[in-house]
Structures are given as structure tokens and as C-alpha cells.
Image (tube, helix red, strand yellow):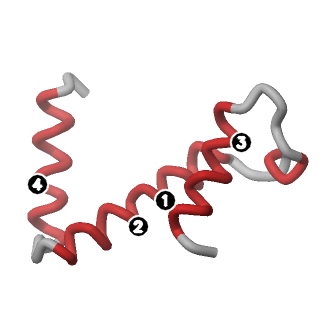
Amino acid sequence: MLIYLKNHELAKCIYSNNKPDYCKNINAKEELKKVEDEIDLVVAGLYGISKEELEGFRELMNILSGK
């Protein structure tokens, strides 16, 4: 399944008031995090950003957001 479609389906599992049946047997928030991480890696690759640089950026964003 294409990444953006999987992301969309998982978001339905988290945010929809009328959740589809396939949402019952998955941890949608955990799966959505995996998909978001995969998207981050693809985008970082497009811009020539290494995994280490991406991790540094994530750490900085966590600090700035108070996490």
C-alpha cells in the first residue's frame, strides 16, 4: 500500500467517530508513528539529509516543543 494511503487509513482509525472494522485489531497510533517515520526518511533522502542529521533535527524539535 502506498505510504500516504496507509497514513490516511490509520488516521481514520484514530480520529473517526465511525471507526472501520479493521481498526479493532491494530494500535493505530503506533502504526501511524511508523508510517510518519518512514515518510520522514523518504523526504530526508530527497533533500540529502542523513539519518543522523534527521535525528538531530527531531531532538531539536522535541526541545523546542518542551518534550
Along the viewing direction, whichever of 19 and 25 lies nearer the viewer: 19
Residue at 61% in and 62% down: 6
Image quarter in which the N terminus is found: bottom right
Image quarter in which the C terminus is found: top left
* Sequence-wise first label, 3 or 4: 3
Label 1 with label 2: CB-CB less than 8 Å: yes
Looking at the rendered structure, the kind of residue marked 4 is Gly
Identify the residue position indicated by label 2 in the image: 38
Q: Residues within 10 Å of mark 1 (few under 14, many from 20)?
A: few
Residue at 52% in and 62% down: 4
Residue at 11% in and 54% down: 56
Q: Residues within 10 Å of mark 2 (few under 14, many from 20)?
A: few
Q: Residues within 10 Å of mark 3 (few under 14, many from 20)?
A: many
* Sequence-wise first label, 1 or 3: 3
Looking at the rendered structure, the kind of residue marked 1 is Lys
Name the element at disc 2.
helix
Find the distance from the CA under tag 1 to the CA under tag 2: 6 Å
Identify the residue position indicated by label 3 in the image: 13
Identify the residue position indicated by label 4 in the image: 56
Find the distance from the CA under tag 4 to the CA under tag 1: 18 Å
* Sequence-wise first label, 4 or 1: 1
5 vs 63, left or right, is right
Residue at 68% in and 42% down: 12
Q: How far across and down, in percent of the image, does residue 50 sit?
A: 13, 73
Looking at the rendered structure, the kind of residue marked 2 is Glu
Name the element at disc 3.
helix
44 vs 14, left or right, is left
Q: Residues within 10 Å of mark 4 (few under 14, many from 20)?
A: few
Find the distance from the CA under tag 1 to the CA under tag 3: 15 Å
Name the element at disc 4.
helix
Identify the residue position indicated by label 1 in the image: 34
